Amino acid sequence: LLQTPNPLDTRLWPARASLGDYARITREVATELDVVLIDHHAHWLEAHDGAVPPTLLGDGLHPNHRGHLVLAKKMIEDLRLHDPASRVCALEIP
């Protein structure tokens, strides 16, 4: 099992601008090894028209409470553990 990191705001964290490359390489390794990949990086960008979603980040790098919920739900979904009756799966943050 491999996971990509969430994307970050490179304007606030310029020294970590290569994180997208790390995510790409993680995808390549997952394909090469034929292991499960949870691609948070692509998921966040695709869900926000290619932009880093500031509403999911506390400081432009680390996920806030909403971001952690998105990470958890993506993992649950990709691992095929989703249960609509589960309080975790049904959890929403206003």
Image (cartoon, rainbow, N blue to C red):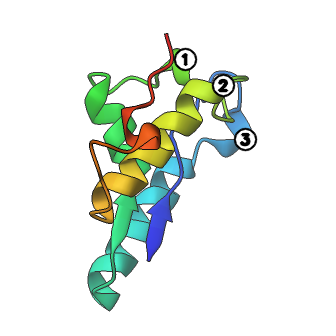
Q: CA distance from mark 3 to mark 1?
A: 18 Å
- Using a 10 Å C-alpha cutoff, classify the residue at mark 2 as few (fewer than 14 neighbours), some (14 to 19) or many (20 or more): some
Q: Is residue 47 above or below residue 16?
A: above
Q: CA distance from mark 2 to mark 3?
A: 13 Å
Q: Which mark is residue 29?
A: none
Q: Are marks 1 and 2 in contact (CB under 8 Å)?
A: yes
Q: Name the amino acid type tagged 3.
A: Ala
Q: Residue at x 33, y 75 (%)?
A: 36
Measured from the top left, where is residue 67 in percent x and y?
Answer: 55, 31
Task: Name which of mark 1 and mark 2 comes first in the sequence.
Answer: 1
Q: CA distance from mark 1 to mark 2?
A: 7 Å
Measured from the top left, where is residue 37 in percent x and y?
Answer: 35, 68
Image check: 33 left or right of 17? Answer: left
- Using a 10 Å C-alpha cutoff, classify the residue at mark 1 as few (fewer than 14 neighbours), some (14 to 19) or many (20 or more): some
Disc 3 is placed on an element classified as helix
Q: Is residue 16 above or below residue 65?
A: below
Task: Name which of mark 2 and mark 3 comes first in the sequence.
Answer: 3
Image check: 25 left or right of 47? Answer: right
Residue at the spot of label 3: 15
Quadrant assignment for the N terminus: bottom left
Q: Name the amino acid type tagged 1.
A: Pro
Q: Which mark is residue 60?
A: 2
Q: Name the amino acid type tagged 2.
A: Gly
Q: Are marks 2 and 3 in contact (CB under 8 Å)?
A: no
Image check: 91 left or right of 66? Answer: left
Residue at the spot of label 1: 54
Q: Are marks 3 and 1 in contact (CB under 8 Å)?
A: no
Q: Nearer the viewer, mark 3 or mark 1?
A: 1
Measured from the top left, where is residue 25 in percent x and y?
Answer: 42, 68
Measured from the top left, where is residue 11 in percent x and y?
Answer: 63, 22
Q: Residue at x 45, y 30 (%)?
A: 91
Quarter location, residue 16: top right
